[in-house]
Image (cartoon, rainbow, N blue to C red):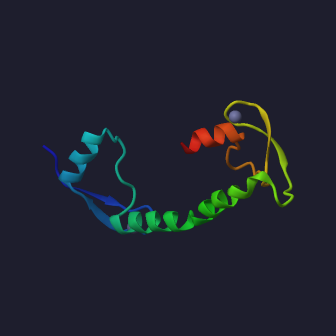
Amino acid sequence: MTMDKTLTCRDCQEEFTFTAGEQEFYQQKGFTNEPTRCPSCRTARKRSRDGGYTGGGAYSSGGGGFGGRRERQMFAVVCAECGKDTEVPFNPRGDRPVYCSDCYRAQRA
Ligand SMILES: [Zn+2]
Ligand SMILES: [Zn+2]
């Protein structure tokens, strides 16, 4: 028998209820982890992530001019997917994988 559970949010330390219905939903989805954040923190994070991602969108639309009207500095990298030497128009910071244009397209597809 499934019962409501009280969990503590890791962000705001508030207690919130992981209801029996939600637990069943998680089980149906095959999720083994319990939620670690209360619903309001989850919503807040989702919103900030969506909002924060406009930079990525702007970047990809800027990629439309990739044919190179303007000279761009290119950085030599090794593709994290296929290991091919390639160049990217931004300075890779090492905190996320860099792909060659083929793999980058495949990732986005
Ligand atoms: Zn919270
Ligand atoms: Zn590649």
x, y (%) of residue 53?
A: 56, 62
- Identify whether 43 is placed above or below 66: below
Q: In the shown orientation, is residue 101 left or right of residue 11?
A: right
- Identify whether 109 is placed above or below 19: above
x, y (%) of residue 97?
A: 68, 43
Location of residue 40 by image quarter: bottom left
| Tally of marks | 0
Along the line of sight, the residue nearer the viewer: 32 or 85: 85
The residue sitting at 87% across, 58% down in the picture is 71
Query: Considering the image in quadrants, where does the N terminus appear?
Result: top left
Along the line of sight, the residue nearer the viewer: 2 or 64: 64
x, y (%) of residue 99?
A: 69, 41
Q: In the shown orientation, is residue 1 left or right of residue 76?
A: left
Along the line of sight, the residue nearer the viewer: 61 or 86: 61
| Farthest residue, direction left | 1
Residue 11 in view of the camera: no
Q: In the shown orientation, is residue 77 left or right of residue 59?
A: right
Split into quadrants, the picture shows ligand 2 in the one at: top right
The residue sitting at 37% across, 45% down in the picture is 33
x, y (%) of residue 85?
A: 81, 35
The residue sitting at 58% across, 41% down in the picture is 107
Residue 31 in view of the camera: yes
